[in-house]
Structure formats: C-alpha cells, structure tokens
Image: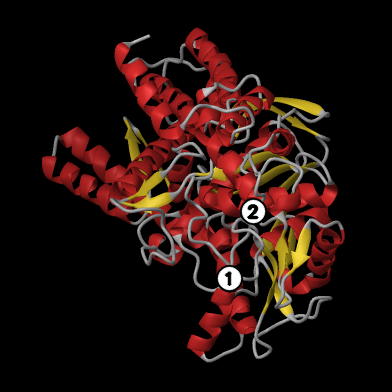
Amino acid sequence: MDPCTAQNRKRKNEQTGPEAPGSPKKYTKIALRSLSNVRHPRLPRNSIDSHNYTDVYRVAWSYNLNTMFTKNFCEIVGKRLKHTWEAPDGFSTGISIYNCVTRRQEPFVVKNKDSVTWYTCGPTVYDSPHVGHASSYARLDTVRNIMRNHFKLNVVSVMNITDIDEKIIKRARQDKTEAKEIAAKYEKEFWEALDLLKVKQPDVVLRVTKNMDLIVDFIKSLVNSNGAYVAADGSVYFNLSEYQYRYGKLQNIPDNYYDGERSKLKRNPSDFALWKRCDPSEPHWDSPWGAGRPGWHAECSALASHAFGNEIDVHAGGLDLRFPHHENEEAQSCASFDRPHWVNYWMHTGHLHLKDSLKMSKSLKNTVSVSDMLKTCSPDVFRLACASAHYSSPIEYSDDWIGNAANLFKVYKNFMRSCADVEKGFVKPSLDCDVLQQLLNESVTSVDDCFRDDFNTPRAIEVLNRIVSVCNSMIYTTATGAVTGNLHYLVALKNVFCDTLTTFGVWPYESTRSVAERGKEDDIVDVLVNFRHGVRQIGIAQKNRELLNACDGARESLAKLGFSVKDYGKVTSWSR
C-alpha cells in the first residue's frame, strides 16, 4: 500500500473510529454494495457510483428511523432501489433508441406496430409560443414522421394542454380577465404556430379542465393504496417512503437537491403535490379532500393513462422536463399500476438557447416568439435547421444557425429546378448510369441506417448533400449526350431526396397553387421570359454586350421576385 494512503487511512480511523459490528458506516457500505449488485449489469460501474450515496440517504430520510443504517434498512434499500430495464415484449422495429434509464441506446420494441402509443407533454398556455417550444415540437414531429413514413409504424399520438395553472391565474389577474380566456387565447396561438411550422397536430388532445374527474380518480387510487397521503390543509402528496421501485432512474439527482425543503404539510422533503388546496376565490374543483387544483405531475399521468393504460411505448418532451416532471410521472404511475416501469422509452429534445445563455424560457425572459422568427426565415428553413441537429442535442439560436439552413435550402431548391430542367428536356447532360445506380443503392441504405441509429437526421442530411453534389456534377458538366435509359436513376435519386426532406417537414417542391390562381401570372412571366430570350439571342449573334447586360439585369430582377431564369444555349427555362 502506498505510504500516503496508509497514513490517510490511519488518520481517518483515528477521527471516526473503527468499523464496529452493526455500525452505520458498515451498513452504509453494505447498502452501497447491494445497490451495485442489483443495478443493470451492462452499465459501467462509474455511472452507478455517482449517485448511490444520494439514493441511500434519500430513502433513509423517507423512513426517518433512528436506526436507519441497520441490516434491515440495507435490505429495504436493496429492494426499493432495485431496477433493471428490460425491453418490452412485442414487435422489434430494428431501431436503436437512446434510453435515459440505462444511459445507452437500446433496441426499440413496441407492443404493437399497428398501434404505437406516443404521449407528448403539451404547453401550459399562459403566453405566446416561442422558438424554444417550436424547436422541440418540430423535432419530435420529425421523429414521428420517420416512424410513420419510413418504418410504417402506426403511431397514435396524444398531447395534454395545461389550461389551468398558477401562471395562467397570475396572467389573468394582470390582464384583468378570466383564466379560461387567457388559456383559450394562448392555446389558439400555440396551434397556429404549429400549423405555420407544418407540425402535425396530435391525434388526441386532452385538456386538464375538461378531464378533472379522471385526474381526481387517479389521485384517489393512490391515496387508497397508501401511495399518497392527505395533508392537514387538504392537499395530497405522493408518499415516496411507500414507493416500491427506484426513484431517480431517469437521471441522477443532485445530493443537495432537497436541501432546505422543509414543510409542515409534507412528511418528507422529496414528496410532491398531487392535489393542491387553493383559495376559494381562485378557479377550483371539488374533490374528496376539498376544493383545489391538480398538481402538474398528476395531470399528465392521469391523462396519459386514460388514453393508453398501464404501459406506454414513448413519452416525449423537452430535456428540462426529465426531472422532476417525468421522474414524478413515472413514480406515481408505477405506484398506481404496481409495476416497475410505466413508460418503455422516454424521449427528450435538447434545449434551444441564445448565445451565452441557458435554455430559452419565458421565466428567464430570453425568448424569441415564433412570429418574430418567421419574419427572418421560412418554415421550411426552420424545419431544416432543426433537422440539422440530432433531436437530443442542444441548439444555439443565432443568425448563423438560420443563415446556414437558408443557404442549404437554396442549394436544395436549385437542385430540384435542375432536375426539372433535365426531365423537361431543357438540359441534356451525360449521365453515368453506373455511378448513379451505385449512388442510389448507397443512399437508400444510408438513409435507412441513419434513421435506425436513434433517428440521426444530421447524418441523413449528409447523404442528401452527397446526392446533390454527385448529380449536379453530371448535370452541369460540359459534356452532353442522350439521357435515354439513364434518366430514371436521376429521378429515383430525386425521389429519395424529396421523401427524406418531406419527412423532416421540409417541402422541396415548387408552390402548387391552382391553375386559376397562377394562370395570369404564369402567362405574364412566359411573355417576359420569351421576350428576354429573343433579345438575348440577338445579343449573342451580334456580340452586343449592352443587350446581354440588359438580359442579365432582367434575370436578376426576376430572381428577386421569386422567379428563377436559366439559360441553356438556345433554350431558356424559368421556375418559381
């Protein structure tokens, strides 16, 4: 043994005394050792040790025993904190998805591929939606699109709307109106923002105020099973000391998280509210424990369980919801259904933040509204920007972030126009059949691999960029030739390209207004482009630089109006 180590150990023993049989120090070690043995065997030990002391002391506090570090207590700790995640029985999708319980990617197995259950935590509607909200819902929409469109899973999505809350009541007082008016106003703005960003609405929307009986019944079942208790003022708290499964499995809880939390109503600092007694002058609902409102965590568990029962395939939300909201949802639902897990896969989106700041949040007053953001970029550009980062990665909202996506979207639009020109016969490039066929096979396989790898959209975008690069190099080559027999490979690659982008919520095609709406405008542009083309041909024949410069100026002016004009020798084409 190293002399310094021996000396430090001797000094420590002198200060604390030897490990006597039955001492707290001895049984703390026994508890920690038992915890290491019951944890998931595939987890690295260092991912366990960082929170064992926290778990032991939390359970010890919840028991409030004078002899908390006894052999009996250590057995209880082993029972309470034992948790191993097991893949559910059902259909194996072939997808690997990050699992925050095991801290690694796991096979994505669903109960039924024809009815994949997906619950998303919805907004508390007391203010206008901001870009942080938008990025989270857009990224989750992309993942659902991949499941539905690419893997052909029938995803059934449910979202709650918290339309009563202290923040809503406070806003109503400020605006001198009723809470329900505030909720209705900002819920409407929320759905309008999602529509603008082409985020599909959930199949089912459950509002708290319309389902209060379900929430009360859920809390009542916990009280009846001793999973919750009624405090002196009529509030109801989750009883963590009676929880039979591990609390803190979604993420490590800091040692000092509950420091300073002391309440005359709660038995333990870590207990959380299921039902909150409120002032009779505020919006309230009747319950067996008196007038009040539900706790935030209880709302989601009750509504999600009403829709999907005692097991859910996917539960999604922002990373900031993982603790305490999702952790508490999981705990109270496991207690209610008496099962070790309620949600099979938790999915969390990374924060969107401003430069040098934390997450974008109304409480931090650092938000950018969706309406303001859309003044600087299109919905397609925003969706492409969101897809450029993995759904779980943080994003820094900046002009560069938007600008990079805008430039990439412009490249994609130009590629689509070039393909259209080849299809219409305006351009007759020399297409290498072997190269295109190999690119097609590799692209299809690569996109599939990306989506199976935890829905890796940034890697899929790299595949799209390669398609554009290789195809453009052929379309714009100086060599020309017949495309007979080879064109279908280019069109097939374009289809892979478009299908992937539409899965991201990005529409690469030209606007599809009706003929009646576009007819006159198209006729005018046709006349102008044909006139310009005639003038340009005269300029080329006469080598008249003045005429050619005038034609270039007309093309640039049309581009500013949204019309792209391309000259191919003796042929000119235009598109929107």
212 vs 494, left or right, is right
Residue 154 in the image: above or below residue 215 = above
Task: Estimate the spatial distance between the alpha carbons at disc 1 and disc 2, rounded to whole Å.
Answer: 19 Å
519 vs 552, left or right, is right
326 vs 241, left or right, is left
Residue 355 or residue 491, whichever sits in front: 355
Residue at the spot 50% in from the left edge and 28% down from the top edge: 460
Inspect the image, locate mark 1, and give the three-letter code of the amino acid beneath it: Val
* Mark 1, other Cα within 10 Å: few <14 / some 14–19 / many ≥20: many
Q: Which residue is the site of mark 1?
A: 125
Question: How many numbered circles are shown?
Answer: 2
Residue at the spot 16% in from the left edge and 36% down from the top edge: 542
Residue 427 in the image: above or below residue 116 = above
Residue 337 in the image: above or below residue 542 = below
Residue 288 image point, x, y percent:
84, 76
Q: Which residue is the site of mark 2?
A: 200
Can see residue 92? yes
* Mark 2, other Cα within 10 Å: few <14 / some 14–19 / many ≥20: some
